[in-house]
Amino acid sequence: MVSLYYLLPLYVMVVTSLKGMPEIRMGNVFGPPMEITFQPWVKAWSEACTGINCDGLSRGFGNSVRILIPSIFLSIVIASINGYALSNWKFKGSEAFFTILIIGAFIPYQTMLYPIVIMLREIGLMGSIWGLVLVHTVFGMPILTLLFRNYFASVPEELFKAARVDGAGFWQIYFQIMIPMALPIFVVAIILQVTGIWNDFLFGVIYTKPSTYPMTVQLNNIVNSVQGVKEYNVNMAATLLTGLVPLIIYFASGKLFVRGIAAGAVKG
Amino acid sequence: MMTVSSEPSVQHAKRPSRLFKNWMSKLASLPMILTALVVFVGGTAWTVTYSFTGSRMLPKTKWVGLDQYERLWETDRWIISIKNLAIYGSCSMILTLVLGFSLAACLDRKIRFESAFRSIFLYPFALSFVVTGLVWQWILNPNFGLQNVVRNWGWESFTFNPLNDPNTVIYGLLIAGLWQGTGLIMCIMLAGLRGIDEDIWKAAKVDGIGTVKTYVVVIIPMMRPIFITALVLIASGIIKLYDLVVAQTGGGPGLSSEVPAKYVIEYMFRAQNLGQGFAASTMMLCSVAIILIPWAYLEFGGRKRG
């Protein structure tokens, strides 16, 4: 069955990560572990080496979390305000800027990589976690803005007009009417950003330095390092650990995840 | 930015200056305006401009015309990258559409455990390309992986070692890429199939048209917009192909699995040859434009998008 093709890698990751090295050398990649050991997981988390650092994936995990939380907060706050301004407070040129933003989502990142290096260097954030947060905020903006704009556009206009008649201003309407109504869309946005930012490799490898590498970059360096004996069980444990966060999000969110990617589908 | 304005903006609307009309909205949109103009437009224009210079370690304005492009198309590595992308792209395009549609069609036939199957097909999409690449690198490992298992079953001469053969390495990447990406296309197709009226099926039954034929002759033409969206999605994903290659093969063996996105990054950040990187990324931009402009034209009938 086709499901086998989809399930096999997950299964192989799990069984390999629970085997000892002698059992792996015997060579049955699909066999269940005869002796379950959690040693590879411990090693992947706290001892695996990248270059001279031997403190395992825990550092990458910490970096990824420290990148993820401010990125999500910043990108969603900015995008929701953008979407709100675009649907309720249109001004001359607002649609033009939005169009540029959406077209920008299709431009290959490679064309913008180097100018951003220069910008980050100018403001002194190159190589730091905050630099990467800024980059994620910028590149998350098109899709999130689209998401919020479409949602706010579907809110009945009478509601907005009534609030205006009552004398509510830009921020009052945003905080007291729009945010409480948009909670489900905030959840979709969070799901979209968690998986997107956690899985990012390109920006991480370019805008950070070894001490601030996110988990994906560190994982790649651990597994694809040329020195030392290859410990496949540790590698698979590390891979599984890195995949765990988006997997948990995926299985916990169910239908909302599908809704998120359906929205993301517009972006590409 | 978060301060609540106590004055109703109606007052501001009465001001004579047009710039201050609706000023809070403009102020709040400033991050968007800056992103659009400075990063997207500015950054792209900057890269395209500097692709005509002889920049090496640092960007400089020594104009060399089209030299960088000439050199680019004379570099073997770039030619290999383009060829690889063409093979990977065309296979991935066709197989993703066929697989994605077939899976969606199967799920649409109201089978049992539909949601379980959907989760199974879609979960790889939640994983990163790095994770995908590393898992498949392990499964396709010649000494311990699939090849070895089949040999142990008694088929001694069985050979399946795509990642270490320059001629087949790209198909090894394809196996991993399809695993990760088909779920998304399936989901989009399924949404499209669900939107098709039940009566169409009834009518086809009355006319005595078979199930497969109904799909090919009636349903697929009806789903044209969905297919176009899927195509644009797959295509923009293919051009961005980078992480998967780095994780699964590192571009090897030799240069046999290099791709354009990797070429750009290698030249910009490792080989200290910025001009080449800029020229290569401009070529990538052109290829996206070639795909997107006809699509935008079809989809939006020539009017402004957004």
Image (cartoon, grey):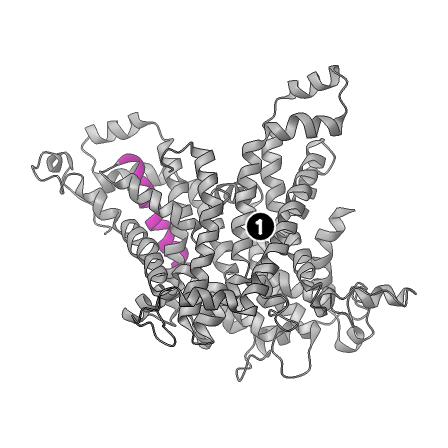
What residue lies at 41% left-to-right and 52% top-to-bottom? A140
**In this rendering, does residue B78 appear at all?**
yes
What residue lies at 57% left-to-right and 32% top-to-bottom? B224
Q: Tell which subunit mark 1 falls on.
A: A
In this rendered view, identify the residue nearer to me: B29 or B61. B61
x, y (%) of residue B172? 69, 61
What residue lies at 46% left-to-right and 44% top-to-bottom? B292
Q: Which residue lies furthest to the right in this view?
A: B154
x, y (%) of residue B288? 47, 50
- Whether B230 is drawn above or below A162: the answer is below
In this rendered view, identify the residue nearer to me: B41 or A40. B41
Task: Using a 10 Å C-alpha cutoff, classify the residue at mark 1 as few (fewer than 14 neighbours), some (14 to 19) or many (20 or more).
Answer: many
Q: Which residue lies furthest to the top in this view?
A: B206
**In this rendering, does residue B122 appear at all?**
no
Residue A12 falls left or right of residue A130: right
In this rendered view, identify the residue nearer to me: B119 or B271. B271
Magenta stretch encompasses residue A87: yes
Residue B39 falls left or right of residue B286: left
Residue underneath mark 1 = A250
x, y (%) of residue A5? 74, 52
Label 1: element kind: helix
Predominant SS of the magenta segment: helix
Magenta stretch encompasses residue A112: no
State the count of labels.
Answer: 1
x, y (%) of residue A177? 31, 36
Residue B219 falls left or right of residue A4: left
Q: What span is colored magenta in the figure? A: A68-88
